[in-house]
Amino acid sequence: MFKYKGLKVKESDAALPKTRKELFKTIVKDDFYLLAELSLLMFLFSLPLAGAFIGEILMIGGAANKDASTVFSICFYCGLIEIPFWGLRYLARYAAFGVMKKRAHNEAGYIKELFFGFLKKGALRGFLAGCVLGLAVFAWQTASVFVIAYNANTWIKGLGIGATTLLFMLAYGAVEYFLSVDNFYRLKFGGALKNGFSFAVMHFPLTLLYFAVTMGLPFGLTLLSTWALLGVAAVFALWGDGLTVLAVTLFSHSLFDKYINSVYYTDYINKGLAAQTEPINEKEKDNG
């Protein structure tokens, strides 16, 4: 991996950012290798899923008979095969969230050792969370292809695709929040996932925006331009995946302070930030 010494603790309180917005800017500016190394590690664990997607597209494009039943069968069986590959990707993403929590809390450690430590610790939970998302993707894909291929009514097509996309989006948001919740608190798997779903629903506009940028954009580029898709994939593999982990981690930590830590874990409020000598603007606090 990169020759990067790891996460360094800032000893002076004056050197710490005062808000999570400042912390976000600081990490993007000063910790390029952290984001890049986490992105590359997640990319390696995502290769089986990427290969399955490419295989599915090639099978559809190369099918001698492209009738509705053939396309549906390919999507159905490939979707099933891809479910454990989603689990493999999120196993690594779980570990990346653990490393990013350490950075957000201004705690030291070596990236590679931390990553594989969290990988071992949360292997089953990260894999299961990925499989939950994989099931949502499978339902979205097969249901969308089914209503498009077998229904002539435009309203039915629209409602079917809209409903399954909504479920996919909420599952995606819930699993992303879950990764942060589960690395922060000691909860049962179902409880952590329930909290993740609650945050995804409570902040639905942000869930929608996040889904559109990280899922909708790559999917749209798949339909428009293979080269554009490859470009976006390269950005995510080399840096962007780590950036998404950073963004979700810091925003979710601000939610934890507001809804959980303020009641149960006051010592964790604003952990990793400079001590507040005066009350900060509530709007700024809520936004992290």
Image: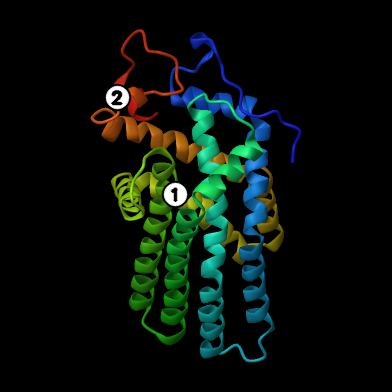
Name the residue that disc number 2 marks.
Answer: 266
Judge from the rendering whether residue 69 lies leftward or rightward of residue 206; answer left or right: right
Residue 176 is labelled as 1
User: Is 201 or 256 nearer to us in this picture?
Assistant: 256
Q: How is the image coloured?
A: rainbow
- Residue 178 in percent (x, y) is at 40, 48
Q: Is residue 181 above or below residue 286?
A: below
Mark 1 against mark 2, which lies toward the viewer?
Answer: 2
User: Which numbered disc flags the more N-terminal residue, 1 or 2?
Assistant: 1
- Residue 219 in percent (x, y) is at 56, 61
Judge from the rendering whether residue 134 lies leftward or rightward of residue 202; answer left or right: right
Q: Is residue 117 above or below residue 129?
A: above
- SS at circle 1: helix
- Residue 81 in percent (x, y) is at 55, 74
Q: In this view, does 284 lie above or below 111?
A: above
Q: Which residue is drawn at 40% across and 28% down?
A: 288
Disc 1 crowd, CA 10 A, few/some/many (<14, 14-19, 20+): many
